Image: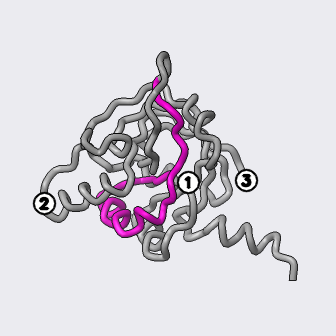
Amino acid sequence: MATVHITTPVSAEEVSKLNAGDQVLISGVIYTARDAAHKRLVELVEQGKELPFDVKDQFIYFVGPTPAKPGQVIGSAGPTTSYRMDKYSPTLLDLGLRGMIGKGSRSQEVKDSMVKNKAVYLAAVGGAAALIAKTIKSAEVIAYEDLGTEAIRKLVVENFPAIVVNDVHGNDLYIQGAAKYRID
């Protein structure tokens, strides 16, 4: 395992260097979107309409942050369960989405789409929402304000910590890690 610093946007070539188990520190812009926002994004794609942001080479963080306290950029910003986005992710990956950040396993369809589209899935540590929020330097709602905490936000982050779960080579840390420590 290595610690890798990446700055978004990230090319397919750059993301191909990441391996399951690597620790990643992300700087730059990442976007937030949860279930309801993903549904709307995919509906726009199906209607042939433009998305509220260009997903090519970007990362989406599956999070619904709490409101910011006075003097803070954002409230707690912990990852949500990623399988909720599984039915939408392949569509966005086909448009060039380079990475997703959340918690929990992904479906085989999403894993196959990541290999095909040279994208990665990263896990953020659940239960560390207040600490993760400290890496977020600015937050701006850019679409679907009516969704409240689930609106799409543009976040500027510095050294946002995550672990590579699924890499572009088809490796899955959740499977490999369990096998490594299995006692037969």
Q: Which amino acid does label 1 sit on?
A: Leu
Q: How far apart are marks 3 and 1 (CA)?
A: 14 Å
> How many angstroms separate mark 1 from mark 2 (CA)?
29 Å
- For the magenta stretch, what is the residue range? 73-101
Structural distance between the alpha carbons of marks 3 and 2: 41 Å
Q: How is the image coloured?
A: one colour
For badge 2, the amino acid type reads Gly
Q: Look at 34% across and 64% down and name the residue there.
A: 88
Q: Which residue lies furthest to the top in this view?
A: 71
- Crowdedness of circle 3 by 10 Å Cα count: few (<14), some, many (20+)? few
Q: Which mark is residue 1?
A: 3
Q: Badge 2: few (under 14), some or many (20 or more) residues near its Cα, within 10 Å?
A: few
Amino acid type assigned to the residue bearing label 3 in the image: Met
Instruction: Quickly name the residue at label 2.
Output: 48
In the displayed structure, 77 sits above or below 49; it is above
x and y, in percent, of residue 27 in the image: 51, 34
Q: Are marks 1 and 2 in contact (CB under 8 Å)?
A: no
Tell me the residue that label 1 is attached to: 122
* SS label for mark 3: loop
Q: Is residue 97 magenta?
A: yes
Q: Quadrant of residue 43?
A: bottom left
Q: Relative to 18, is 68 above or below?
A: above
